[in-house]
Image: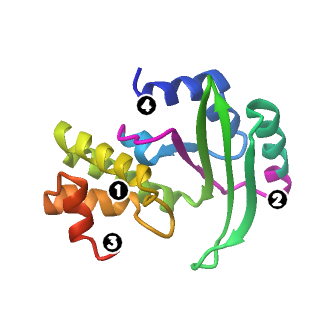
Amino acid sequence: MTRKEKADGILESSRLLEHLEKYGRPHVIGSCRMDMMAWNDIDIDIENQGMSLEKLYQLTSYIIETFHPFWYEAKEEVNDEGQTVWFQGFEAMIVGERWNFDLWFFDRETIEKAEAFCDGIAARATAAQKEQIIGLKQELIARDLYAFDKFHSMDVYRAVLEEGVVAIEEFLEKSPKA
């Protein structure tokens, strides 16, 4: 079973997407949407037109009761554009595997841009390139180089799709972050 199939099974069995409908329309994005998952990570953007701090607390209760996370974070913040956004992130053991969930509450326009980006990458990448992308991400994870302050998915997509990089050594050699 692929990571994507496992992720879909988790979303179905937990009814997470159905529950998120109470707060706004959910959209699976990122590597799960593109079927290029290098690790157990599910990113969901939710349209936030009706979100509030009180609803954030209600969602917190559902997440804790449903997933029993061993790590959890929730916050309300104002982004660079002056918009209020909410975040809930958690990690939980599901069927013996560690899974990370990132739930972001954004406006519809921001989500549509994220979906268009993901769909563009997925459409552009050949099957071989998708495997190269997954492989490079896994190599970066194994070297502890895949993080907020290090390399990101965007770096890998650019390297594979625009520069033709196929191996980790070549990626690190060409990268200004290395």
What span is in magenta?
Answer: 35-56
Mark 1 or mark 4: name the one nearer the start of the chain: 4
| Residue at numbered disc 4 | 4
Tell which tag, 2 or 3, sits nearer the viewer: 3
Badge 1 amino acid: Phe
**How far from the left and from the top, in percent, is residue 161?**
19, 56
SS for dot 3: loop
Q: Mark 2 near mark 3, Cβ–Cβ under 8 Å?
A: no
Distance between the alpha carbons at the discs numbered 2 and 3: 40 Å
Q: Which of the two discs, 4 and 2, labels the residue nearer the N terminus?
A: 4
Q: Residue 162 at x, y = what percent?
A: 17, 62
Does the magenta segment cover residue 95? Answer: no
> Is the residue marked by circle 4 packed among few (<14), some (14-19), or many (20+) residues within 10 Å?
many
Q: What element carries label 2?
A: helix
Between residue 134 and residue 35, name the one nearer to us: 134
State the residue at coordinates (53%, 42%): 42
Marks 3/4: CA–CA distance: 30 Å
- Secondary structure state at the residue bearing disc 1: helix
What residue is pinned by disc 2? 53
Query: Marks 4/2: CA distance?
Result: 31 Å
Q: Quadrant of the C terminus?
A: bottom left
In the picture of the structure, the residue carrying the numbered disc 3 is 178
Residue under the point 22% across and 68% down: 173
Whole-angstrom CA distance, mark 1 to mark 2, is 29 Å
Residue 107, x across and y down, in percent:
58, 61
> On screen, 172 above or below 81?
above
Q: Mark 1 points at which residue?
A: 117
- Amino acid carrying label 4: it is Lys
Mark 2 or 3, nearer chain start: 2
